[in-house]
Image: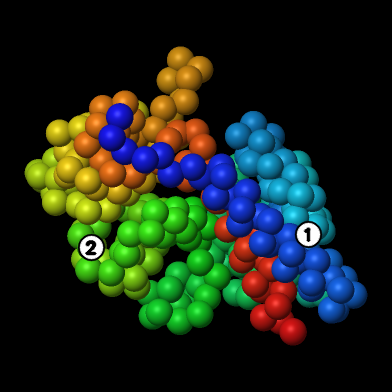
Amino acid sequence: MKAQIIDGKAIASQEKAKIRKEAELFNEKYGRQVGLAVIIVGEDPASKIYVSNKIKACEETGIRSFSYRLPESVSDQDVINLIEELNKNEAVDGLLVQVPLPKHLNEQKILSHITVDKDVDGFCATNVGNLLLSRECNKACTPAGIITLIESTGVDICGKRAVVIGRSNTVGKPVALMLLEKNATVTVCHSKSKNLADICKTADILVCAVGKKHIVTADMVKDGAIVIDVGMNRVDGKLYGDVDFDNVSEVASYITPVPGGVGPMTVTMLLNNTVKVAYRGK
Ligand code: GUN
């Protein structure tokens, strides 16, 4: 194997130690804990795991968590009323609604009620717009984690050719903007892209966020590229990334594993955003 593994678990753990110190300092200085409120609606098993991981991570870093579990039967207005209440609550610095919401709820309408400052997911239109305009904002957590992982290699992003596969609002589009902000030359590919393999082969930095097992094969990767795998594909009970890890490792210089790569960074960046919001409010 040629590539060095980018150990997301270890990097997340180092970042969490820094966040813990900042959270402790905040508590000493302002006499209260940094607070994160999490709303979950219904019984989606994956969402329940994600939310319990967020609450556990709050405990590890000295952040106070406020968790609200609402039944599947709630209305848009019920969720919006709770959001409005938490928007006003001064003990709550960050606020998120776990998605996906049950089908009968209007997700975009509900999320739009979270105040811009407390939107620690960085999902709202104003935060996304501010990212586009290179203004200070809450940045989406998975893309911010990807940038931290790339920077952990010591390779300068400036001037590199970056290819992002996937154009989701939560990963593909924001990570492309963040790479552009770091002065990479960025191409975004998607399901309608022609010559995907040829485009990928030009990448010094290749980020794949598609959700299809092993869509990136070794022949698509430039010698010495940094490869970031955002995929989490469960097939027959086993977890696979979007990247054919074993074969791509023979070509790339750095690569993230699945699990243990991008995954642990998302929650860490959420806590980082929450602490930053708390200090910004002072
Ligand atoms: N569902 C899956 N990932 C996320 C996330 O990062 N934030 C929220 N709010 N919901 C999610």
Horizontal placement of 252 versus 74: left or right? left
Q: Earlier in the sequence, mark 2 or mark 1?
A: 1
User: Given this view, does label 2 or label 1 mark the residue nearer the observer?
Assistant: 2
Q: Position of residue 153 (x, y in %)?
A: 39, 54
Judge by depth and name the residue closer to the eye, 91 or 45: 91
Disc 2 to disc 1, C-alpha distance? 37 Å
Looking at the rendered image, the quarter that the N terminus falls into is top left
- Disc 2 and disc 1 in contact, CB within 8 angstroms: no
Q: Position of residue 70 (x, y in %)?
A: 76, 46
Circle 2: element type: loop
Please indicate, yes or no, whether residue 81 appears anywhere in the rendered image.
no
Q: How is the image coloured?
A: rainbow
Which residue is pictured at 68% across the width and 56% down the height?
A: 17
Q: How many marks?
A: 2
**Residue that extends furthest to the bottom in the rendered view of this protein:** 282
Circle 1: element type: loop
To which residue does mark 2 refer? Answer: 160
Residue density around tag 2, few if under 14, some if 14–19, many if 20 or more, within 10 Å: some
The circle on residue 63 is 1
Judge by depth and name the residue closer to the eye, 157 or 129: 157
Q: Position of residue 267 (x, y in %)?
A: 61, 51
Snapshot quadrant of residue 162: bottom left
Horizontal placement of 135 versus 276: left or right? left
Which residue is pictured at 51% across the width and 45% down the height?
A: 8
Using the image, determine if residue 100 lies above or below residue 148: above
Which residue is pictured at 10% across the width and 44% down the height?
A: 198
Q: Amino acid at mark 2?
A: Lys
Which residue is pictured at 49% across the width and 42% down the height?
A: 7
Does mark 2's beta carbon lie closer than 8 Å to ligand 1? Answer: no
Q: Amino acid at mark 1?
A: Ile
Looking at the rendered image, the quarter that the C terminus falls into is bottom right
